[in-house]
Image: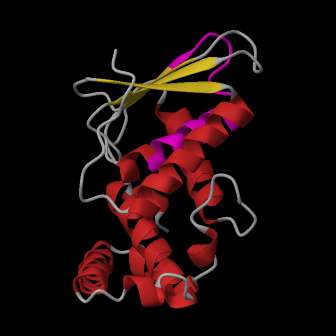
Amino acid sequence: MAAEMIVSPGESHTLVSQEERLRRHLADRFSVRTRFASMTDVRALLVSASTADAEKSLVIAGDAGAAERIYLYVHVAAHIALQHNLPLVTIVEGPPGVTRLGDDSHTHLEAERLARAMWWAPDAADLGAPAGVRGSALLRRLVSRGATRAALRSVLLALRAAYYDLGIERAMASTRLAAWLRDAFCVTAVVTAAPQLSD
């Protein structure tokens, strides 16, 4: 089992640092040890012990991008908060947005609803969207529909390219506008990977 994940060269630093922050939070708050492995048809496995405070193992598909990993961390945290992982349960996650049938479909729907609430909650400092954009009603409306989400992503990618191509990153790096755009790009990437996080 690989201990390293694949980081795509095109992934933004903001997205990767958000992913690392959420992974650390899962380890510190929920005792979840994360590993990465090559898997087919499965995006993540959460293996739990019989008690809530015991260490848990989360295995994520090694080819999952940072945006998908962020979604999986929030979704797994929702399962843990709802105690779906107790006692001695292995939770299997398929690709984001795939409808589940069978005995566990109800628990996954519950976890989806809680994950969405956790992602957008104004006070969700640990598992929520980046704080700079979490309360933005405009951004939330734009990412809620596929067409506007795709258009926004294209615009943000173009702005990101211009930011670096024009060499203005040093002059603008510490501005609130640049921080908002970085956070908006992160949220858009995550909701593109997991549309169920939108309203």
Instruction: Tell me residue 92's x, y (percent).
Output: 42, 25
Looking at the image, is 143 positioned above or below residue 123? below
Please say which color scheme the image uses.
Answer: secondary structure
How many marks the image carries: the answer is 0
Q: Is residue 88 magenta?
A: yes
Give the residue drawn at x 58%, y 66%: 130
Give the residue drawn at x 34%, y 14%: 1
Which quadrant of the view contains residue 174? Answer: bottom right
- Please indicate whether residue 172 sits to the left or right of residue 128 in the image: left
- Please indicate whether residue 167 sits to the left or right of residue 183 in the image: left
Which quadrant of the view contains residue 32? Answer: top right
- Residue 162, visible in the rendered structure: yes
Give the residue drawn at x 58%, y 49%: 21
Instruction: Tell me residue 113's x, y (percent).
Output: 57, 52
Looking at the image, is 80 positioned above or below residue 75? above
Looking at the image, is 123 positioned above or below residue 114? below
Q: Nearer the viewer, residue 4 or 146?
A: 4
- Please indicate whether residue 6 sits to the left or right of residue 3 in the image: left
Question: Which residues fall within the magenta stretch?
Answer: 70-90
